[in-house]
Amino acid sequence: MNMRPRKHQWLGLLPDALVQTKGSSHANIRYLTFDDGPDPIYTPPLLDLLAEHGVKASFFLVGQKIERHPRLVERIVAEGHMVGNHSYSHWSFKRMTTRKKLDEINSTDALLSAFDGRAHHRMRPPHGYIGADLLCYFAVQRRTFVYWSYDSLDYQDRPNRVMVDRLRADPPSPGDIVLMHDDSDRARDALTVMLPEWLSDGHAFHALPQEAR
């Protein structure tokens, strides 16, 4: 039932300033992160749930969806969550040229900037693929990729009780960055059960800090 990442372990060998896989464990903090939104069906009830429990999270958004659902992005920012860059098209970077990858990142940064005024945003590549070219570019630019240390497996099409049982048996540890998605109801349904339990156990959930510039 272990949900620790089974891939990308080599990224843990890189400095946190370039590739972050864990957050601060101070004060029992964990970090919920949601990929692939914003979604007009699934994101609003997830935001309602987070607001109900006073939890802040991080949303890695897709540029094409930002353009289609700007009011959802406004709400995410207004409610104190972090917005991050999850590329423009959500196509894998694996077969893209370096120029195309940078176009995907820069166009999404520009879209997000209209909502929070930041020139750069934390970046999580689609499907988890970076490539040596982007690693070098981000190192020179002093920018950071964000991965995860805890995979909720919410992309698996399994009954909600199965996911709840897994989360309860192997909860995230202090400092864990939890990978979830807001393009289905699976994360929200599981968190509806687990957030009250985790909070009553003293777990705290924060948004990841934004880029310094």
Image (tube, rainbow, N blue to C red):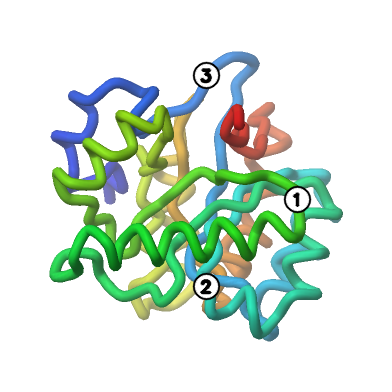
Q: Earlier in the sequence, mark 3 or mark 2?
A: 3
Q: Are marks 3 and 2 in contact (CB under 8 Å)?
A: no
> In the picture provided, is 201 more to the left or to the right than 53?
left
Q: Residue 25 shows which numbered tag?
A: 3
Mark 1 — residue? 116
Give the quarter of the figure containing the C terminus.
top right
Whole-percent x, y for residue 23 in the image: 48, 27
Task: Quadrant for residue 8, please give it.
Answer: top left
Give me the C-alpha separation between circle 2 and circle 1. Answer: 28 Å
Name the spot of residue 84 as percent of width and height, x first: 56, 52
Q: Earlier in the sequence, mark 1 or mark 3?
A: 3
Q: Residue at x 24, y 39 (%)?
A: 135
- At mark 1, the secondary structure is helix
Q: Which of pointers 2 and 1 lies earlier in the amino acid sequence?
A: 1
Asked which secondary structure carries label 3, the reply is loop
Characterize the local packing of mark 2: few (<14), some (14-19) or many (20 or more) Cα atoms within 10 angstroms: many
The residue positioned 53% from the left and 63% from the top of the image is: 108
Residue 66 visible at all: yes
Name which residue lies at 63% across and 65% down.
111
Q: Can the viewer see residue 49 in this picture?
A: no
**Amino acid carrying mark 2 in the image:** Arg
> How many residues crowd mark 3 within 10 Å: few (<14), some (14–19), many (20+)?
some
Q: Amino acid at mark 3?
A: Ser
| In the depicted structure, whether residue 211 falls above or below residue 158 | above
Taking depth in this image into account, of 163 and 187 the one nearest to the observer is 187
Q: Which element type, helix, strand or loop, lies under badge 2? A: helix
